[in-house]
Amino acid sequence: MTHRAFIFDMDGTIVDNMAFHTKSWVAFFEQRGHTIDADEFFRNTAGRQGHEIMSHYMGQHLTKEESALLDAEKEALYRELYAPHLETVAGFDQLIEEAQEQGVKLAVATAAPPANIVFTLDGLDLRRHFDAVVGAADVARGKPNPDVFLLAAERCGAAPENCIVFEDAPLGVEAARRAGMRCVVLTTTLPAEAFKDFDNVICVARDFSELNIAELFAGSSAK
């Protein structure tokens, strides 16, 4: 477990898509008579798995099969909305190229289901760059539980203290904290103030073009 690793959340981090996720959730629940506040919904659910969100809003009575069908319906709506806009956040491609040249392992750790991982990583031809891809099908619990980050680190052969997580949501930053990992926050979705109380955040940036790999591992990047 001697490698260094970058572990990337996918939605809202590799791609700037959370507005489309929230829009699809709002439409999905409105069709079923639920009115939700988009900002509050994001803050409370970003990083949680689909079945966890379904149970919270639709009721614990849902069977696993019913929840899976509803989640698949919502995710299909999301992919339809976001497909015309699919692209990486500025600076991402250069950052991972430089990281690979420096021997840094790369992983994705996301709450997304398999179909969305295929949609994003294969749609952008990114999967080949990653040493590990961990998603909702690989762990039982979503963020803020640390499971997805710990499994990604294990598959990269990296100890938690040698990992830097890239996130855009408070629940994800909390999951990284519980995993014993430092975190870089991208303000694709929320302002920097939303993360001021996390002691594991070493850097806040608009996108990847502002980041320096040596400074990140040294922990010296300014917040």
Image: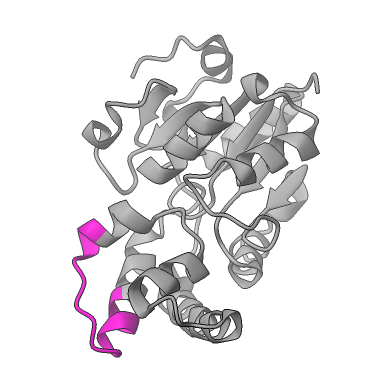
Figure quadrant of residue 69: bottom right
Figure quadrant of residue 34: bottom left
- Residue 143 is situated, as x and y percent measured from the top left of the image, at 49, 48
- Residue 198 is situated, as x and y percent measured from the top left of the image, at 35, 26
Rendered position, 84 above or below 47: below
Residue found at x 42% / y 67% = 53
Residue 49 seen anywhere in this rendered image of the structure: yes
- Residue 9 is situated, as x and y percent measured from the top left of the image, at 53, 46
| Side (left or right) of 146 relative to 185 | right
**87, 59: nearer the viewer:** 59
Quadrant in which the C terminus appears: top left
**100, 10: nearer the viewer:** 10
Is residue 32 one of those drawn in magenta? yes
Is residue 62 one of those drawn in magenta? no
**91, 25: nearer the viewer:** 25
* Most distant residue in the front direction: 61
Rendered position, 183 above or below 140: above
Residue found at x 68% / y 63% = 137
Quadrant in which the N terminus appears: top right
Residue found at x 38% / y 78% = 59
| Side (left or right) of 126 relative to 192 | right
Residue found at x 23% / y 64% = 38
What is the count of numbered marks? 0
- Residue 10 is situated, as x and y percent measured from the top left of the image, at 54, 51
Residue 169 seen anywhere in this rendered image of the structure: no
Coloration mode? one colour
Magenta residue span: 26-40
